[in-house]
Image: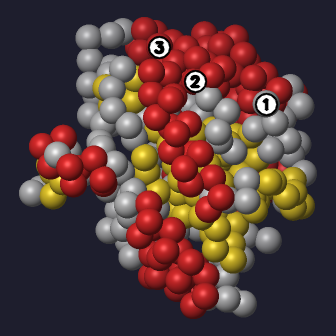
Amino acid sequence: MLADYHVHCEFSDDSAYPLLAVCRDAVDLGLDEICFTDHVDYGIKPDVDEFRRDPSCAPVVDGEPITNVDYPRYFAAIDDARERFAGKLTIKVGLELGVQSHRVDQNHALFKAWEEKLDFVICSIHEVGDLEFWTGDFQRGRTQAEYNMAYYEELLRVVQTFKDYSVLGHLDLIRRYDPAGEFPFEKTRDVVAAILEQVIADGKGIELNTSSFRYGLPDLQPSCDVLRLYRDLGGRVLTLGSDSHKPEHLGAHIEECHGRLRELGFTEFCTFDHLVPSWHTL
């Protein structure tokens, strides 16, 4: 079974990939199941209804306001796609929440508002203190050790207080935006272990994000060190996702990463239905 559980479409501010085109392409690629996981990042961009009340609250890029998912339209579009592709493709609906410790209450309220519609939720850390990684704003003025440790310490705070998710997305995302290169795993191992222990205790999981290949990282994401640690701690809930935003991303390296996970000693991966995991043989 091939499932891509990290897929973005035009409902994410950083993608123009039409939802129906994603579904058609998934069928052509031989994917059995996909899960849409479009972006929500409180502190960086507002919800659509907030923007409608106060257009000045949204950042503008290339003349377009940047907002979180338009939830009613998003869920309705996925319901329509399910009908169109019935019998050809299993389509699940999720969100990727960019959670920060001081924004937990907003994310919890959002989850409770739409819980009945959701199959899956990714908890990611895209920013700390409302400073984004991809722009370099978070790293600026800090040493490599300082921004790496600050990232993982924030992730630990989040998993200690936020429970409305299925898996952690690209757990070591800071590696993707580290201008100094790879930071030694040994220096973050203890805090990563604490994160994983909390995740496992809560019955949550992590994802293998195959975008590491297109970003040119020298290892998987999370790294093999993190994956081995998760395995050794008893972690079982594991999804695979391409983090696709364009046609060339969709489904990329999913099958290859089944093999990589088997080499690391994993035997199963998960899909989700109404927030409940099911296990499949790798």
Q: CA distance from mark 1 to mark 2?
A: 13 Å
Question: Can residue 181 be seen in this snapshot?
Answer: no
Q: Earlier in the sequence, mark 1 or mark 2?
A: 2
Q: CA distance from mark 3 to mark 2?
A: 12 Å
For label 3, the crowd category at 10 Å Cα-Cα, with few meaning under 14, some 14 to 19 and many 20 or more, is some
Taking depth in this image into account, of 275 and 270 the one nearest to the observer is 275
Residue 23: percent from left, percent from top:
54, 80
In the image, taking residue 77 as reference, residue 89 lies left or right, namely: right
Q: Residue at x 56, y 31 (%)?
A: 172
Q: Is residue 222 above or below residue 100?
A: below
- Pointer 3 with pointer 2, Cβ within 8 A: no
Residue of label 2: 158
Taking depth in this image into account, of 59 and 111 the one nearest to the observer is 111
Taking depth in this image into account, of 104 and 220 the one nearest to the observer is 104
Q: Is residue 22 above or below residue 48?
A: below
Taking depth in this image into account, of 239 and 29 the one nearest to the observer is 239
Location of the C terminus by quadrant is bottom right
Residue of label 1: 202
SS at badge 2 = helix
For label 1, the crowd category at 10 Å Cα-Cα, with few meaning under 14, some 14 to 19 and many 20 or more, is few
Q: Residue furthest left?
A: 63
Residue 21: percent from left, percent from top:
45, 82
Q: Residue at x 73, y 59 (%)?
A: 274
Report the disc number at residue 150.
3
Q: Amino acid at mark 1?
A: Asp
Q: How was this image coloured?
A: secondary structure
For label 2, the crowd category at 10 Å Cα-Cα, with few meaning under 14, some 14 to 19 and many 20 or more, is many
Residue 142: percent from left, percent from top:
33, 10
Location of the N terminus by quadrant is bottom right
Q: Residue at x 15, y 58 (%)?
A: 64
